[in-house]
Amino acid sequence: METSQLIAKIIGCVYIAFGVGILLNGNYYKKEIPKLLENTSYLIFGGFLAIIFGAIIIENHPFWVKNWTVLITIIGWIALIKGMLLLAFPTTISSFKSLFSIPKIYPVLGVFILIFGLFFTYFGFFS
């Protein structure tokens, strides 16, 4: 459970910061996220990081249980698969760029990310 709480603390803090950032600085993210998706260097670097963090989570948290901790294992697998897809199919990611050109997506995304972060922060720090 200590590993679950540590990973939940990290995920929670990152997602709260990102969610608040999107909600309070939406115009900044509307400009920068499409640039990020155009820059192949960032996509390749992001692919490597996703594989590394996904593999670390999977190796240290391989728990398929019927409680909240299974979400950490799922996040690890999603990160690993995402990283592999970013490196194997880098041009495909540009199709997601149009999703981020929808103006209303940022407030919705910010709220979703913030709720996700609060969920993990609760279980990481208070359970």
Image (cartoon, rainbow, N blue to C red):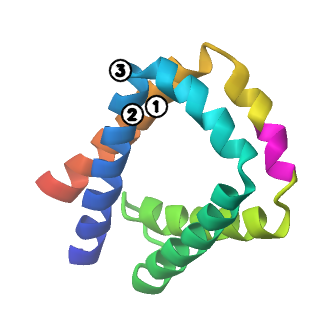
Q: Is residue 32 on the magenta stretch?
A: no
Q: Which one is nearer the viewer's eye here, 123 or 49?
A: 49
Nearer-N-terminus badge (1/3): 3
- Looking at the image, which residue is at 79% across and 28% down? 98
Q: CA distance from mark 1 to mark 3?
A: 14 Å
Q: Which residue is mark 3?
A: 24
Q: Secondary structure at mark 2?
A: helix
Please state which amino acid type lies under the numbered disc 2: Gly
Nearer-N-terminus badge (2/3): 2
Prevalent SS, magenta region: helix
- Expressed as whole percent of the image width and height from the top left, the position of residue 20 reads 33, 30
The residue lying furthest to the top in this view is: 104
Q: Which residues are magenta?
A: 92-96
The residue lying furthest to the left in this view is: 126
Please state which amino acid type lies under the numbered disc 3: Leu
Q: Which residue is mark 2?
A: 19
- Looking at the image, which residue is at 87% across and 54% down? 91
